[in-house]
Image: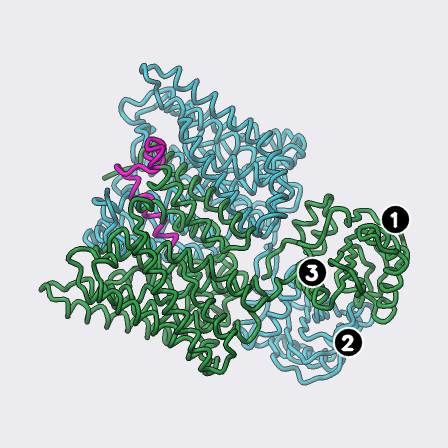
Chain colours: A cyan, B green
Amino acid sequence: MQHLSPHDVMTMFLALATLLGCAKLAAELMQKIGQPPVLGEISVGIFLGPTVLGHYRPHAYETLFPTTGPMPIVLETVTTLGVVFFLLTAGLEIDLRSIFRQGKSALLVSIFGVAFPFASGVLAASAFPKYMGAEAGANPLIFALFVGTALSISALPVIAKILMDLNLLRTEMGTVIISSAMFDDLVGWILFSFVLGMMHPSADGSIGSGVKHTIVLVLLFVGITLTLGRWLIDKILPVLQAHTTWPGGVLGFIFTLTMLGAAFTEYAGIHAVFGAFVVGIAVGESTHLRQRTSQHIHQIVTNVFAPFFFASIGLRTNFVSNFHLGLTVTVIGVACVGKLLGAGWGARLGGMDPTSSLAVGLAMNARGAMEIILGILAMQAGLIRENMFVAMVIMALFTSLVSAPAIHFLIRRRRKLTLKDTVTAKLFLPNLAAKTRLGALREMCEVAAEAVSNAPERLLRLVSEREHVLPSGWENELAVPHARVNGLARPLVVVAKSEGIDFDARDGKPARLIIMILTGDNQSQHDLLGDASELFSRKEAVEQAVNANSFLELVAALNAPVR
Amino acid sequence: MQHLSPHDVMTMFLALATLLGCAKLAAELMQKIGQPPVLGEISVGIFLGPTVLGHYRPHAYETLFPTTGPMPIVLETVTTLGVVFFLLTAGLEIDLRSIFRQGKSALLVSIFGVAFPFASGVLAASAFPKYMGAEAGANPLIFALFVGTALSISALPVIAKILMDLNLLRTEMGTVIISSAMFDDLVGWILFSFVLGMMHPSADGSIGSGVKHTIVLVLLFVGITLTLGRWLIDKILPVLQAHTTWPGGVLGFIFTLTMLGAAFTEYAGIHAVFGAFVVGIAVGESTHLRQRTSQHIHQIVTNVFAPFFFASIGLRTNFVSNFHLGLTVTVIGVACVGKLLGAGWGARLGGMDPTSSLAVGLAMNARGAMEIILGILAMQAGLIRENMFVAMVIMALFTSLVSAPAIHFLIRRRRKLTLKDTVTAKLFLPNLAAKTRLGALREMCEVAAEAVSNAPERLLRLVSEREHVLPSGWENELAVPHARVNGLARPLVVVAKSEGIDFDARDGKPARLIIMILTGDNQSQHDLLGDASELFSRKEAVEQAVNANSFLELVAALNAPVR
């Protein structure tokens, strides 16, 4: 029986720490320049893999990621867990009801958005299988279906992030896009499960019966899990929440189910990720699943386990020596044309104007993790060559990278303003001298006026007038005085901490945190007030800001997640 | 390069799902009968391992946990991650300052509580090395030191749980016990790191220089991590919280550090868990670490990853064929006598009365995960035989199992009453008919009176009198009318949902959730009111209870964790 030696254990933790640390760093940098973090995680893997580190420092590479001994199995175990758990969270976020609730537009965008890239992928792959990277001896029909499928799945998490950043998520266009992307995910995976099933010939060597077996098992699994399973889960969750330790019992239940689903789909002849995904959907549908439970899963999985997987993609092959320009351009071209045309036309038929339709097409065009997972499976199954895998990864990176700036350019939506981005160290008053409401407002208006070379009296008059109409004391010891100031070039946010000043709050408590918002336009004011109300709905959030002893800690307190 | 075949992946998920599902089930059952959940996780592993399943159904056992091929490495990878992350959370919970803040008692309990069992372990092991399960050829000095160390570490999480259940955690005795247990953990691990270091002879075959090397590296690591490292982490956390996505950036940082620490201690010649533990302490010391961040880590690690490890303990050996009654009884005897005498005498010298001192000894006597981890390492290093490992696991289970009932018997502390344990389906009124405060109280008193065959008028008079003195409207649309009713044998809690009835709340809002608490004694009333105030401090908790459509959902809403 093989064992891990102390040296293996050391290498394991060193390799995992390197992958995670570098991946998170790159992800945060991507985030800073407004790009999806997963792009950073994938790129850093390419850097750590055979492409760069393995090429220029082969010795260091071999020490960190040995290709002999037990280490490849160790890494594959961790990345397999990572991707299976990632698909669980992806499934949890899918809302079956909202897909069906959407009208004609979503349906058309979904169907056209899958059908067009699928058809163009199948056509291109059947016409030029060798050029498109088919492995010698791969079944041409299976290969064509694979390429079609791989080009038709959109990247739900990337799309959701882009819409959120562009302030489009709650618009009608946003809902249509998200519903269609969810539907695409579902259809794409079912298509792919068939392709995978076709790759496993049955015992007598014929493709037919193996496929039939897989298709029957997968359809049964999806059908039963999403109906009877969903119903059962919805009945079991409240029992667990009432009679087991919370959230321990529920977490154990969800992860056990996920791994059972993963084992079953692997048994049926398709990949474990599909089982985890379907179980995730079934669990996520339950109204009894509490947000705190899914938050625990989401945060640890997306921030610790998924990065292991995404960073490991780059370890699988050399992205320079296997790079084929023509093939890559072709894959990108076919993928983009198919998706833009399909989803865009669907939106147009659904009654959207041409610009919005193009924006829908651009959003749906973003690809991501799914294509890459499919690519890895196809490469392992001997269906595609490494140059096709590289082309697919680059296609996924490229389409995601282009999506947000293109939509932004097209419909010029302002990014939502947040308090965190607006506050400045100069406008933070950790110790307000004033003891009265008017005194506090005056003190704050003075620093604000100084920052924009304006007259403090004018600001004070505007804020006081507003205060007179509607006192600005909110709940939880927070006051948010605000005013529109004509001619103000950029929004000003003054944050002050006080011992307690009466701002006529509904709960009668004096304010210990005062956030003054001065804007030149209504939209910014709306954004900033909305951000304040969202951030400070919980008492602890105000507490955290009041306890901030430096500007840095204040920014940290304002940097809470949306949910 | 080895790869996992689809069959391996299937086996992996089936094995992990079986381990997790069974472990959680057993843990919850243990919890129900008032025992530490970890006992269930370990027992279930013994059942699934060679002892029971492998003995009676060898074929099923070999299918689920194959001993050939890549599966042993896969399982070891997952359980190693599990135990390393578990030690991270154990470290996060240690509070260095509170250890030093405690007075003479804690110091004496700590020192005596380590010294006595250590000395008795060393004595017994030196006198009868073979009987005590030393592996043939094991260095007798190292073996004696190992046994001493293994007997002296208390089980911090088990002890904390026992104190919490017995309502002792916030008492003076509780603080002394917890501080001493933390200190024990720390000292025990440092001792063990020396023992482990001594096991690795240096290149020239002499034990001396290898030990020196390890000791210097470990001391440097602990010293630097807990001073400079701690200071740096405290500076870096606010920066991460201000400038990276939250909690993603912080989580990535903590897990990367943990794995680096694990890799370093493994390099230094001791086990990865020690590095994770020390990093956990350094991170946990930072005042900037937010509770929500550590909650994410704590919940997923203790409920998903740690059970993999604890359940896998039973897979390591056959607990029946390696069971040696005499040895097991000796180990239990030496462990208990040393700890009870040491910790108890320490408490007595610190000024506690004899009964409390014995209770302190009994609490400190609980062993757990640490002994077992040490045992596994010692077995892998060829220091102890399997029968000693089995004896150590049984000793850990036995001492934990005995601790709570013994303390309970000794000082007869009442378990804290909770709303969840007191509510009954009959006393849940999902639709209150009354629209006024008096009407609501009358309606609720009527069902309460019926349940105990009492006169409703009497209850109503008592509750109304109390209501008259102090209106029972709390914040967040909750009202908690209550009264002491002489002669009431057991506490009554009536829960009612209403459209909104004015109960004179401080925030002026009408109550939608009304919880009436009637008790015969002051202590129960204090417990139940305290539980209500803790549970419903957050608005969402009230919301959840108001939305409960069945008694089951109400119990689920009352079953929130303490923190």
**SS type, badge 2:** helix
**SS type, badge 3:** loop
Q: How far across and how far down the image is residue B532, in percent?
A: 70, 61
Q: Are marks 3 and 1 in contact (CB under 8 Å)?
A: no
- Tag of residue A423: none
Q: Residues within 10 Å of mark 2 (few under 14, many from 20)?
A: some
Kind of residue at badge 3: Phe
* Residue beneath the point at 33% across and 36% down: B55
* Residue beneath the point at 40% across and 56% down: A26
Q: Say whether residue A443 is magenta.
A: no
User: Which image quarter is the C terminus of chain A in?
Assistant: bottom right
Is residue A71 left or right of A288 when viewed as pictured? left
Q: Which residues are magenta?
A: B54-83
Is residue B496 left or right of B286 when viewed as pictured? right
**Residue A83, image quadrant:** top left
Q: Residues within 10 Å of mark 3 (few under 14, many from 20)?
A: many
- Tag of residue B433: 1
Kind of residue at badge 2: Arg
The chain to which mark 3 is attached is: B
Q: How far across and how far down the image is residue A560, in percent?
A: 57, 61
The CA distance from mark 3 to mark 2 is: 42 Å
- Tag of residue B536: 3
Is residue A302 left or right of B545 when viewed as pictured? left
**Residue A472, image quadrant:** bottom right
Q: Is residue B498 above or below residue A230?
A: below
The chain to which mark 1 is attached is: B
